[in-house]
Image (cartoon, helix red, strand yellow):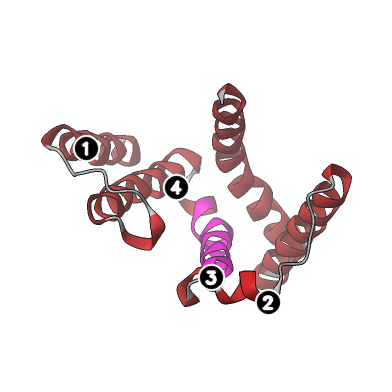
Amino acid sequence: MWYLYGLTILAGLANAVQPGQNAALSKSLGLPVTAGLVVLLVSTGAMLAGGLALGKLEMPSGHQMAQVPWWAWFGGCLSVLLILAQLYASPSMGAASFLGIIVTVGVVASIVLDNYGWIGFAVHPASLLRVLGAVFMIVGVGMVALF
């Protein structure tokens, strides 16, 4: 279980670094949408290589595919939205404001998702302390963005 925390820490670091990488690619090419496509193609190649190397890449059966909720197929569209934000918004906002907004909005949205158990999450009530933590995050991001 502890390795999952390590993986999550690495993902957080990647989340801080990736917007700069993607924005630099976009600026160098002068083609933001093409840069976004390159990012997705590299991601696909890395996932394919990793899956093959670990022996974890399999084709789902028809039954498995039929069990997937209709809305779960569209997670990749949200990745496109995140990449476009990295390409267009992060260069002018800066890393701290951009990531602060992304993370804070994610936490606020997650509190709502957890509270109602939407999109497959277990129910975790939106307690006063959880909501207060989100408010502190909003205030903190506001301070980072302004100063």
Circle 4: element type: helix
Residue 68: which disc?
A: 3
Which residue lies under the disc numbered 1? 139
Q: Earlier in the sequence, mark 4 or mark 3?
A: 3
Residue 39 x, y percent position in the rendering: 72, 59
Q: Earlier in the sequence, mark 3 or mark 1?
A: 3
Residue 76 x, y percent position in the rendering: 58, 67
Kind of residue at badge 4:
Phe
- The image shows residue 70, relative to residue 4, as above or below, that is below
Residue 62: which disc?
A: 2
- The image shows residue 71, relative to residue 55, as above or below, that is below
Q: Where does the N terminus fall, quadrant-wise? A: top right
Direction from residue 66 to residue 48 in the image, left or right: right
Q: CA distance from mark 4 to mark 1?
A: 15 Å
Which residue lies under the disc numbered 4? 98
Question: Of circles 3 and 1, which is in front?
Answer: 3
Circle 2: element type: helix
Q: CA distance from mark 2 to mark 3?
A: 10 Å
**Magenta part of the protein: which range?**
74-90
Kind of residue at badge 3:
Val
- Rendered residue at 79%/55% (across/down): 57
Kind of residue at badge 1:
Val
